[in-house]
Amino acid sequence: MVKRVRDDWLDLARETLIRAGIEAVSVQRLSRRLGVTRGGFYGYFGTRDRLLARLLQDWREINTGALRRIAAPARKDGAVQINELVRMWIEDEDYSPEYDAAVRDWARRAPKVARVVRRVDVERIRLITRIFRNLDFRPAEAHIRARITYYHQVGYYTLAVHESRRTRRRLSPMYALVLTGSRHPR
């Protein structure tokens, strides 16, 4: 048998969650797919609940980390920030819409997960609000624009809208106009 590391378990748990849902993330199924006994799993995580907690942390890091970097307080150029945000979503760079959808689906059945998702949503909206503030919008307007922007993007993924990247790139100036009031922010 091949020795597996903690990240192998986490990577497979992520892939399984995305592909088949939270019910499919079982120690037995993961160990079978990895070709190892369950003993290694318990050495790394102890319980399935700890794996699921780590999976939730992984989702938060992967799907919010890039936004944190884009909206970092030291960065003040809102035009650059909004363009990087749009690029992240269009190119699916440093953000996995499938992972986000899988965690949101899990949250519909698990109140603890739903609370984490709500906290992450609040954080993401706060970060996007910062970007709109850097575009010189007043606090209340920046917050509403951030909410509209974020809810639009979550809805885009939830509805499983399928457009080519080319189409999404072509439409981005119109989205910029609607969301920021300018085709090309500053």
Image (cartoon, rainbow, N blue to C red):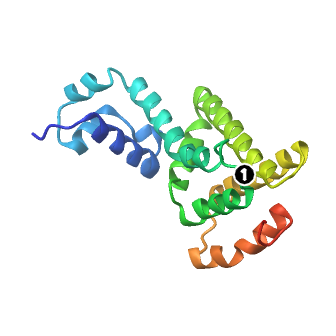
Residue 90 location, x and y as percent? 60, 66
Place residue 120 in its image quadrant: top right
Does residue 164 show up? no
Judge by depth and name the residue closer to the eye, 184 or 95: 184
Q: Quadrant of the N terminus?
A: top left
Which amino acid type corresponds to the residue marked 1 in the rendered image?
A: Tyr
Q: Secondary structure at mark 1?
A: helix
Which is nearer the eye, 73 or 167? 73
Residue under the point 60% across and 60% down: 89
Report x, y in % for residue 186. Answer: 79, 66
Judging by the rendered image, the residue that carries numbered circle 1 is 150
In the current view of this chain or complex, which residue is farthest to the left? 1
**Residue drawn where x is 62% and y is 60% of the image:** 84
Is residue 50 depicted above or below 66 in this figure? above
Please determine whether, in this image, residue 61 is positioned above or below residue 171: above
Dot 1 crowding, Cα within 10 Å, few <14, some 14–19, many 20+: some
Q: Is residue 158 visible?
A: yes
Answer left or right for 40 relative to 147. left
